[in-house]
Amino acid sequence: MPAEYALGVQLEFVAEPEAQAILARTLMPSQELDTLAIKHAGELYTKYCALCHGDERQGYAADNAPSLRSKSLLATSMNNNFMRYTIQFGRANTAMAGYLKAQGGPLDYIEIELLLEYLKQTAGVTEAIDVSREPVIGDIPRGEGLYNQNCATCHGVKGEGVSAPALANPMLLATATDHFLRYAIAEGRDGTPMIAFKDSLSDNDIDALTAFLRTRASGWDIPRLDTVRVPTPDEYILNPDSEAPEFKLRAGRYVSAEQVNQALADGKRMVILDARSEVAWRQMHIPGAAPVPYYEDPENFIDDIPNDGTQIVIYCACPHAASERVQSTLKRYGYENTAIIDEGILVWAQMGFPVRNGT
């Protein structure tokens, strides 16, 4: 930092933040993270990932988020951008939000690199499994039949994801090579319900299934995208001159999507908060909702939210985990009229209720 002196300019050197120093000295090619870097990465994981992927990276803590300690997944991701882009940009229309700061998330590029190295190192993955970048050629109609027989129960009839990842997601298929997909089908994912199909399906069958998935690269249904703008605090209250809705809550905290949709249609006074990252909000949100990510420090948003008795509705995709964290924060600050959309935004959209898809 330059400071002015009588005889010219002298440089004053100010110590860099500890976290930045840790990253700079530890994120070197083929170098293991040291104790401080692992501690910092673990804190990032706990803050941003554990909510859905579990404290021990075991997965399935919320919304069937997959295990992040599968050696199969991590080793086949080392020499490509699959995991990197998943964390950076998320998966639109799924519970996996994007976390890259340049996209509206909380993490810098280098922090995401640290997380990737942390996941690999804590899972004991030391060598990459190289998968070819060549296309897989297969019988697509046969692959569709095999998908319906073997995959739809967990991954959804339209690849939307049920208890396993959504395979029709354009971001997934844009970042997963054919042989990355083929390896997962053939070898399975250790530590997850995804079994290996190499013993029950022939090589030709696995090729056919892979080729069919590739035809879904644009998804089964493509939404229209709008350019969206984050609402300003003075826009948080919807229909400010109207009456408040009268919700019937389940367990004192959950409101049905149907009631909220009706309140919107009736022009009721309320605030709607999206508890996911801003990246996920930009990709799809309930009209009028403001992004208040579950991981944000309260001082960054609490003064923007009216505490005058206005009904506050919160949602996420989990369908509750992130919303419950935001609701708990609001209650701690004295907000009384809060409710969580019971079904979450993904089911809300599947029910045909209004959403905005944007960029």
Image: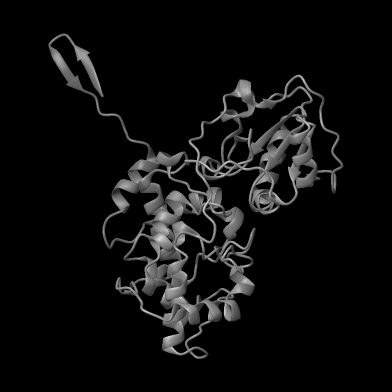
x and y percent of residue 119 in the render?
Answer: 44, 62
Please give left or right for residue 304 compared with residue 168 in the image: right
Q: Quadrant of residue 28?
A: bottom left
Residue at point 24%, 17% (across, down)? 3
Quadrant in the rendering for residue 120: bottom left
Q: Is residue 218 above or below residue 255?
A: below
Quick check: can you spot residue 331?
Answer: no
Q: For the view shown, which residue lies furthest in the top direction?
A: 6
Q: Confirm whether residue 289 shows in the render.
A: yes
Above or below residue 174? Residue 209 is: below
Q: What's the residue at 45%, 82% (across, down)?
A: 206
Q: Residue furthest front?
A: 141
Give percent across and percent down for residue 35: 41, 56
Q: Residue at x 50, y 75 (%)?
A: 189
Image position, residue 322 (x, y; %): 64, 47
Horizontal relation, residue 81 to residue 304: left or right: left
Assign the N terminus to one quadrant of the image: top left
Q: Position of residue 97 (x, y in %)?
A: 53, 49
